[in-house]
Image (tube, rainbow, N blue to C red):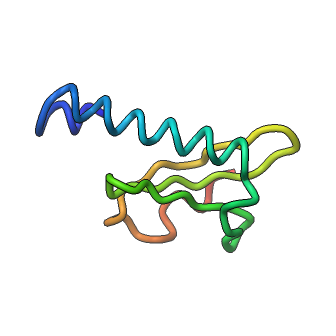
Amino acid sequence: MKYYEDIANAKLADEFYDEFRRYIIEASEHPEHFNLRVGGFKRVNLERFPYNFLFRQKEDYIRVLVVRHHSRHPDFGTTRT
């Protein structure tokens, strides 16, 4: 969010947060909508912003392991537990 505040304004940072939060809720309510990746992770791509996050499905919640920019190496954050 700080990045978007710095390059644009608080409104863009809020829009990023709103989209991120919407996908966190979607992933936690419907984790089956997202494909399983190597290592047991699931990935969610944001629509408007070039970010994605990796999560693991637990019994009654999800655990977000990393939020990363699309320019990051695909293995970035996959060694976290």
User: Residue at the location (77% across, 38% down)?
Assistant: 61
User: How far across and how far down the image is residue 23, in percent?
Assistant: 54, 45
Q: Position of residue 66 (x, y in %)?
A: 53, 49
* Outermost top residue: 10
| Foreground of the two, 11 or 38 | 11
Quarter holding residue 16: top left
Residue toward you, 10 or 69: 10
Q: Residue at x 61, y 60 (%)?
A: 79
Q: Residue at x 23, y 35 (%)?
A: 12
Q: Position of residue 13 (x, y in %)?
A: 27, 33
- Which quadrant of the structure image shows residue 8? top left
Q: Is residue 70 left or right of residue 41?
A: left
In percent of width and height, residue 58 lies at 82, 46
Query: What is the quadrant of residue 70 in the picture?
Result: bottom left
Q: Quadrant of the N terminus?
A: top left
Question: Is 6 placed left or right of 51 in the picture?
Answer: left
Residue occupying the point 72% across, 53% down: 31
The mark tally for this picture is 0
Question: Is 42 placed above or below 5 here?
Answer: below
Above or below, 5 against 36 in this view is above
- Outermost residue to the right: 59
Give the side of residue 81 with respect to residue 53, left or right: right
3 up-or-down from 48: above or below: above
